[in-house]
Amino acid sequence: MSDPTLSPAWQALKAQRKALAKTAMRDLFAEDKKRFERFSMSAAGILLDYSKNRITPDTMKSLVKLARTSQLQTAIEAMFSGVAINLTEHRAVLHTALRNRSEQPVFVEGKDVMPDVRQVLARMKRFTQAVRSGKWRGHTGKRITDIVNIGIGGSDLGPVMVTQALTPYWQKGLTPHFVSNVDPTHISETLRRLDPETTLFIVVSKSFGTPETLLNAQLARRWLVTALKDEAAVARHFVAVSTHTEKVRAFGIDTTHMFAFWDWVGGRYSVWSAVGLSVALMVGMDNFAALLDGAFAMDQHFRTAPLAQNMPVIMALLGIWYNNFWDAQSQVVLPYDQYLARFPAYLQQLDMESNGKSVTRTGKPVHYATGAIIWGEPGTNGQHAFYQLIHQGTRLIPADFLAAAESHNPINQQHQVLLSNCFAQSKALMLGKTRAEVRAELTAANLGSAEIRMLLPHKVFPGNRPSNTLLYRKLDPHTLGALIALYEHKVFVQGMIWDVNSFDQWGVELGKQLAGAIEQGLVNPGKASGHDSSTNGLINTCKALRADS
Ligand SMILES: O=P(O)(O)OC[C@H]1O[C@H](O)[C@H](O)[C@@H](O)[C@@H]1O
């Protein structure tokens, strides 16, 4: 892969960015009455309105050329067909196989993986039906009422985000809980509210070697065995999801109660596998299948639509446009949908762990910006907190707004209030408010000229701040599946253009390695001295504070 910045498309985009420096989106809208039609599209039940971006048709043409230069279409096919594109781990990247709803085989090193995928889905179906119907009971014969997913990173964020997003589909009488943090407070506060006789733990870990998860699972296991006074109780209250049968067995979970997945599924791409067991327990296997169907619909679109009409590609290119040509550092995600409250957190791992890289796939340093900082909160809460900076701050922050046309809770007109806020925000960001407009407003309010002079600069909105809006009918499992797949593919496209490996995460290892030695320092008696002075100081102060208490 060659340096993307050397391509003619990159150079053309640089020139276009200069040419657009003084162009306001409000003028582009005024000049072209069909701007919405020109810059919007639908796929898999989702409308993307990208008209409120600093783009002209020429910008889009050059962006698409840039994608072509990166041989994107070949890369898409390589991913879908099981080529080991995760070079540093020598692995295929096949979360798309998990939701391959066609009859087509998917090969990894000559073996069709689809029979295994279908077999695990069938096991999930049997198991979830047994728990939901009350056939599967706890050790003392009681029905399961609470499900605790113990996992972290991809083994937590997907399950928790999707479960929460699909709250309207939950089975009555079942309550989900998610424990991730190694902070003992997390598991303790969760267990405090639970009855061991009716609680089912799902220990989810791809590696089954993540200390946070294993420590929390051990605590849960001890809590259960102590309460039920029988080691054998573990069999009815613990199941595991992992790629590592041996480690699951060593932990003491019967491997007949283990759901497998495979090393060609990245942790942050794994909710489609048995990692989504807590989701399936809460919403039932039919709804879980609809989630897969939605993702499959987006996969089909991504794989077959021409680049210029390809939703994940367009979103990725717009991200690159701001990241690399307008120096935007972050991307805010603003779901006007309370059910998507954890969506920004989910996207943080998906995007930042995938594209937060500074060497190319062949290990050369990159000299251009890669993955953006992803952040966000549901609307309208964000409006009353940080939108000030988005509207009037010094930074350019491209925004993704997400909204459902229909609410699961249609009470009075409140959903219309939510939607009007959503549309008003993107309009305000685009339009801004000029000095002349502010002056006219203040004059109409009969303010004196000194007061007007004083207030005027504070009340001006520069506008021209870009956003996308994703609009769908209702947040059902199908739509949610499509939405997640959309962002997964967006991240993939950006990684391909930046020439980084979006599927490894070596950057999380160093801290893990160092934590072991620091833990020794905290546990062992005496003063720590083997670290830098700050680390020694923190360890020793901690010990002194404890000794004082
Ligand atoms: O599922 P596990 O093997 O327990 O891994 C859990 C998480 O931990 C790692 O540190 C990675 O950064 C994540 O990508 C992963 O999802």
Image: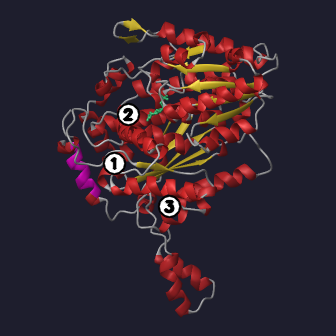
Q: For mark 1, what is the residue?
A: 530
Q: CA distance from mark 2 to mark 3?
A: 28 Å
Q: Is residue 426 left or right of residue 75?
A: right
Percent x, y of residue 169:
72, 30
From the Cβ of disc 3, is ligand 1 less than 8 Å away? no
The residue wearing badge 2 is: 492
In the figure, is residue 525 to the left or right of 495? Answer: right
Residue located at (46% from left, 27% from top): 301
Mark 1 is on which residue type? Gly
At 56% from the left edge and 40% from the top edge, which residue is drawn? 181
Residue sitting at 46 percent across and 43 percent down? 524
Label 2 vs label 1, nearer the camera: 1
Q: Magenta residues, as a range?
A: 9-17
Question: CB at mark 2 closer than 8 A to ligand 1?
Answer: no
Query: Label 2 amino acid?
Result: Phe
As shown in the figure, which amino acid type bears the numbered disc 3?
Answer: Leu
Mark closest to the chain's N terminus, 2 or 1: 2
Quadrant containing the N terminus is top left
Q: Quadrant of the C terminus?
A: bottom right
Magenta segment includes 12: yes
Dot 2 or dot 3, earlier in sequence = 3
Secondary element type, mark 3: helix
Does 175 appear in magenta? no
